[in-house]
Amino acid sequence: MFADGSEIVIDGSVIIGRSPTQTDPDRPARLVTVRGEGRGVSRNHLRIDVRDDGAYAVDLASRNGSAITPPEGERVRLEAGTPYRLGAGSRLTVADLTCEFRAV
């Protein structure tokens, strides 16, 4: 859920960005465009993949970076291309935009 109350249901893979495009033809993803409040969001900023063993966020070599803050832990800046597991209640920061990851 984003700060404005909007939500994105993720039931597979999504790419979040200012003007996202498919990054891997072998692993298609739903494209989610962030406008307005997302200053500093790259064209293809972040990929989230839901797998059998959980959800993972991967920074797509974005200019302004991404981070995860688990409910019980410290903020971790994502290294581009490295999958990071998302736990329920984690805060996900995409440039200057923050949202909360909730498991359904």
Image (cartoon, rainbow, N blue to C red):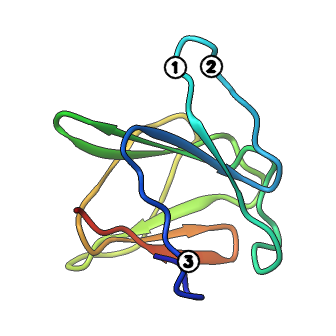
Proximity of marks 2 and 1: CB atoms separated by less than 8 Å: yes
| Gap in angstroms between the C-alphas marked 2 and 1 | 5 Å
Residue at the spot 64% in from the left edge and 76% down from the top edge: 97
Describe residue 5's horizontal placement relative to residue 34 as left or right: left
Return the residue found at the far bottom. 4
User: Where residue 100 appears, x then y in whole percent?
Assistant: 41, 75
Residue at the spot 51% in from the left edge and 64% down from the top edge: 67
Proximity of marks 1 and 3: CB atoms separated by less than 8 Å: no
Proximity of marks 2 and 3: CB atoms separated by less than 8 Å: no
Judging by the rendered image, the residue that carries numbered circle 2 is 24
Residue at the spot 69% in from the left edge and 68% down from the top edge: 95
Of the 4 image quadrants, the one containing the N terminus is: bottom left
Judging by the rendered image, the residue that carries numbered circle 1 is 27
Question: Residue 15: which disc?
Answer: none
| Gap in angstroms between the C-alphas marked 1 and 3 | 25 Å
Q: Earlier in the sequence, mark 1 or mark 3?
A: 1
Name the one closer to the observer, 57 or 16: 16
- Identify the secondary structure beneath mark 2: loop
